[in-house]
């Protein structure tokens, strides 16, 4: 299996991304057919906007037209005790 294709810069909103270095590469992976397994990794739930983000993601994933494309949707939040 071949690796990802190296492409020029981010396709959307390039001004929102500051690369680590001038030689930072951007990768494009081939599209895979669903159903998809999606995970939302959240640092911790200490801000109300993080709670809203999780609720919004769950509501979006639960929509019938989206849910039929998903095999699994998980939300994982770490606690504040992680070193």
Image (spheres, grey):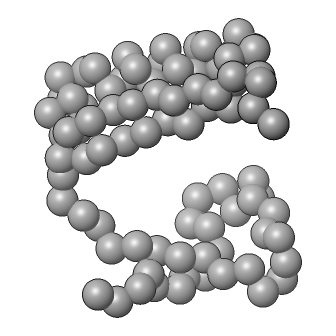
Tell me: residue 6, above or below residue 50. Answer: below
Residue appearing at x 64%, y 28% in the figure: 78
**Name of the residue lying farthest toward the left:** 68
- The N terminus: image quadrant: bottom left
Residue appearing at x 78%, y 86% in the figure: 23
**Name of the residue lying farthest toward the top:** 48
Tell me: residue 5, above or below residue 60. Answer: below
The percent coordinates of residue 37 (x first, y second) are 30, 44
The percent coordinates of residue 53 (x first, y second) are 57, 21
**Along the line of sight, which residue is nearer the eye, 59 or 8?**
59
The percent coordinates of residue 28 (x first, y second) are 46, 74
The percent coordinates of residue 3 (x first, y second) are 41, 85
State the image quarter where residue 74 is shown. top left
State the image quarter where residue 73 is shown. top left
Q: Is residue 73 left or right of residue 13?
A: left
**Along the line of sight, which residue is nearer the eye, 69 or 38?**
38
Q: Is residue 83 left or right of residue 72?
A: right
Residue appearing at x 71%, y 10% in the figure: 48
Residue appearing at x 62%, y 67% in the figure: 10
Number of callouts: 0
- The C terminus: image quadrant: top right
Tell me: residue 62, above or below residue 25. Answer: above
């Amino acid at each position: 299996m071949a690796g990802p294709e190296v492409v020029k810069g981010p396709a959307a909103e390039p001004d929102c991304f500051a690369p680590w270095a001038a030689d930072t590469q951007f990768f494009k992976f081939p599209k895979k057919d669903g159903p998809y397994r999606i995970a939302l990794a959240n640092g911790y739930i200490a801000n109300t906007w993080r709670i809203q983000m999780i609720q919004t993601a769950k509501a979006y994933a639960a929509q019938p037209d989206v849910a039929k494309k998903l095999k699994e949707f998980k939300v994982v939040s770490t606690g504040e005790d992680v070193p």
